[in-house]
Amino acid sequence: MADEEDTDPYIALIPGGGWMIYHSKAKSGWSDPVVAWALCASGGAVPLEADHDGTVRPLKAPAADAEIWHPESSSRRAQDRLQHHRNELNAGGT
């Protein structure tokens, strides 16, 4: 089975720039940082995230249970995600 990288190869990587991925699979959800953006030959970009072991993987699209947000955004939804992320950190989460 071909990987996404095989059908639309990555041509460059750039830093994550502070972007976050909010996962809503769990009851309370959690946020992980985008460690890098993979720029694709087609002109698209794929967010890359790392798991708890440090393995970097692309966020496969479409990901109905994931939302990309930036902490500096003024949108209400992004501010809610930021507050949730801060609460996670204060509670000893990731």
Image: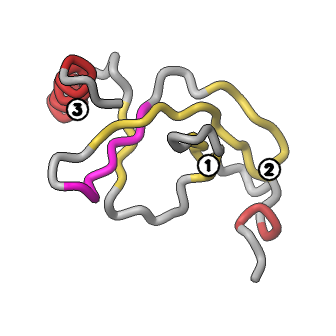
Q: Identity of the amino acid at label 2?
A: Tyr
Quadrant housing residue 80: top left
Quarter the C terminus occupies: top left
The first of marks 2 and 1 along the sequence is 2
Q: Of circles 3 and 1, which is in front?
A: 3
| Residue at image mark 3 | 81
Determine whether the residue tagged by mark 1 lies in a helix, strand or loop: strand
Give, as a single range, the part of the protein colored magenta.
20-26
Outermost residue toward the bottom in this view: 1
Residue 59's disc is none
Quadrant housing residue 47: top right
As rendered, which of 18 and 39 lies closer to the eye?
18
Q: Identity of the amino acid at label 3?
A: Arg
- Taking the magenta stretch, the answer to whether it contains residue 22 is yes
- Which residue lies at the image location 62% right of the left edge and 38% below the top edge? 54
- Which residue lies at the image location 42% right of the left edge and 36% below the top edge? 32
Q: CA distance from mark 2 to mark 1?
A: 9 Å
Residue 10's disc is 2
Q: CA distance from mark 3 to mark 1?
A: 21 Å
Q: Residues within 10 Å of mark 3 (few under 14, many from 20)?
A: many
Q: Identity of the amino acid at label 1?
A: Val
Q: CA distance from mark 2 to mark 3?
A: 29 Å
Determine whether the residue tagged by mark 2 lies in a helix, strand or loop: strand
- Taking the magenta stretch, the answer to whether it contains residue 27 is no
Describe residue 75's horizontal placement relative to residue 69 as left or right: left
- Place of residue 58 in the rendered image (x, y in percent of width and height, measured from the top left): 61, 52
The first of marks 3 and 1 along the sequence is 1
| Residue at image mark 1 | 46
